[in-house]
Amino acid sequence: MKTDNYLKAHIKELEEKLLNPEVRSSRTELKKLLADDFFEFGSSGKVLYKDEEIGESGIGIVRMTLSDFEVHPLSDSVLLATYSIFNVENKQHSLRSSIWKLNEGKWKMVFHQGTKTDPSA
């Protein structure tokens, strides 16, 4: 199963929204992108859940750049997004993966994982 370029660009745009300060600082905007049963294995080692971790002020502001973005279809309505992140603030590289599910015509993130990497290794 292949993804078309439009779908890849759309999912990348959604991932980039989750790095945007206006989205990250808005519980309302985050809820538009995250599924009700969303959870995350953070690069900090913590397991985070949508309803437990998102306060009124969102999930915090970050300065990150995204690269090496790919989409891997798992079914007609579920896909895996993989990419690299560079955190400008702490100079940390990480590998990221997200599972997105199409629900009522909208893609929502159901799972995310960040794994710190050492680019010199």
Image (cartoon, rainbow, N blue to C red):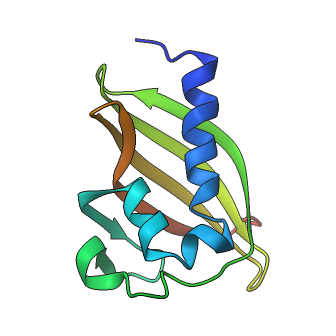
Asked if residue 82 is positioned above or below residue 3 in the image, the reply reads below
Instruction: Compare residues 47 and 18 and report the one nearer the observer.
Output: 18
Q: Position of residue 24 (x, y in %)?
A: 56, 73
Residue in view at x 56 percent, y 79 percent? 25
Instruction: Work out whether residue 117 can be spotted.
Output: no
Q: Is residue 43 left or right of residue 17?
A: left
Quarter of the rendering containing residue 11: top right
Instruction: Compare residues 44 and 112 and report the one nearer the observer.
Output: 112
Q: Is residue 101 left or right of residue 2?
A: left
Q: Position of residue 37 (x, y in %)?
A: 20, 60
Instruction: Compare residues 74 and 8 and report the one nearer the observer.
Output: 8
Q: Is residue 31 left or right of residue 66?
A: left
Residue in view at x 42 percent, y 62 percent? 113
Q: Position of residue 106 (x, y in %)?
A: 38, 37
Residue in view at x 58 percent, y 68 percent? 23
Quarter of the rendering containing residue 84: bottom right
Quarter of the rendering containing residue 39: bottom left
Residue reaching furthest to the front: 28
Instruction: Compare residues 108 and 8 and report the one nearer the observer.
Output: 108
Which image quarter holds the C terminus?
bottom right
Q: Is residue 27 left or right of residue 118?
A: left
